Image: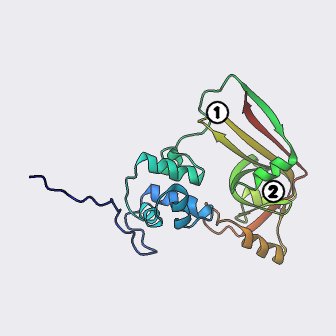
């Protein structure tokens, strides 16, 4: 005698109430951070990658082992690689891929450089002080024609007010062995106007990753902007 068994679709356990992070993994933290940076709700991300919003919540809040297909779809919607999403590439220094033979370096016009500046939140400020040159990463925001960032009052960047500095951002893709960089040069100023400081706080994307008391706003209004991109073919 054959007994028919009715199958039911697999449904992941329900996510915990909002605010709980019990069991959250590195995958969950990275997924949530990237989704929020893009301004997507869990439901919106779910619709775009073919999953339910509750399942996205489950991935963010619980220890989960999604299939590689699910990871690929989620990473594609978030604009990152699977290694970026899972943290597998977190400790790897970018740029180790083998160069391609059909490579050329092309200059970017100022409009493209400014567009690329607006896509990033972390760059490097290069200053020259009494101890010599220093290059430090900073969380930055583009406000009108200026590039602004917060630092502590006694840092090399804060002491460089009134001097010419350079600010650089770049992107490196090890999979395709290409990338781009943008360099902005100009005088660094301390932001002292109260209204301007309030505006910068309003448009800032996040708090400085370095933590601590970093309420000293600095801005660079570029006198020149240059950029380059590695292209193939």
Q: In the rendered image of this protein, does residue 110 appear above or below residue 210?
A: above
Can residue 177 be seen in this snapshot? Answer: yes
Q: Position of residue 68 (x, y in %)?
A: 43, 46
Q: Which of 143 and 71 is in front in this view?
A: 71
Residue 11 position within the rendered picture, expressed as x and y whole percent measured from the top left: 35, 62
Q: Which residue is at 24% across, 60% downward?
A: 6
Residue 177 is labelled as: 1
> Mark 2 or 1, which is nearer the eye?
1
Quadrant of residue 38 within the rendered picture = bottom right
What residue is shown at x 38% (from left), y 67% (from top)? 22
As drawn, which residue projects farthest toward the left? Answer: 1
**In the figure, is residue 190 to the left or right of 173?**
right
Which of the pair 6/113 is nearer the observer?
6
Q: Residue at x 46, y 55 (%)?
A: 27
- The earlier-in-sequence mark between 2 and 1 is 2
- The secondary structure type at the circle numbered 2 is loop
- Residue 111: x and y in percent read 85, 50
Q: Is residue 184 visible?
A: no
| Residue 1 disc label | none
Which residue in the structure is indicated by mark 2?
160
Name of the residue lying farthest toward the right: 223
Residue 160 place in picture, x, y as percent = 81, 56
Question: Which secondary structure, mark 1?
Answer: loop
Outermost residue toward the front in this view:
1
């Amino acid at each position: 005698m054959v007994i028919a068994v009715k199958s039911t679709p697999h449904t992941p356990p329900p996510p915990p109430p909002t605010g709980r992070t019990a069991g959250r993994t590195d995958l969950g933290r990275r997924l949530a951070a990237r989704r929020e940076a893009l301004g997507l709700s869990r439901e919106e991300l779910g619709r775009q990658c073919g999953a339910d919003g509750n399942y996205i919540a489950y991935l963010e809040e619980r220890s989960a082992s999604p299939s590689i297909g699910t990871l690929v779809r989620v990473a594609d919607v978030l604009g990152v690689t699977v290694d970026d999403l899972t943290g597998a590439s977190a400790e790897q220094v970018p740029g180790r891929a083998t160069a391609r033979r059909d490579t050329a370096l092309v200059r970017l016009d100022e409009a493209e450089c400014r567009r690329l500046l607006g896509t990033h939140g972390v760059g490097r400020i290069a200053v020259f002080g009494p101890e010599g040159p220093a290059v430090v990463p900073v969380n930055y925001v583009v406000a009108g024609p200026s590039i602004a960032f917060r630092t502590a009052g006694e840092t090399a960047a804060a002491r460089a007010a009134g001097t010419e500095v350079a600010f650089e951002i770049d992107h490196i893709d090890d999979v395709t062995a290409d990338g781009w960089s943008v360099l902005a040069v100009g005088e660094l100023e301390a932001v002292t106007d109260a209204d301007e400081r309030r505006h910068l706080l309003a448009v800032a994307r996040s708090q400085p990753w370095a933590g601590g008391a970093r309420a000293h706003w600095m801005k660079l209004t570029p006198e020149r902007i240059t950029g380059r991109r590695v292209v193939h073919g």
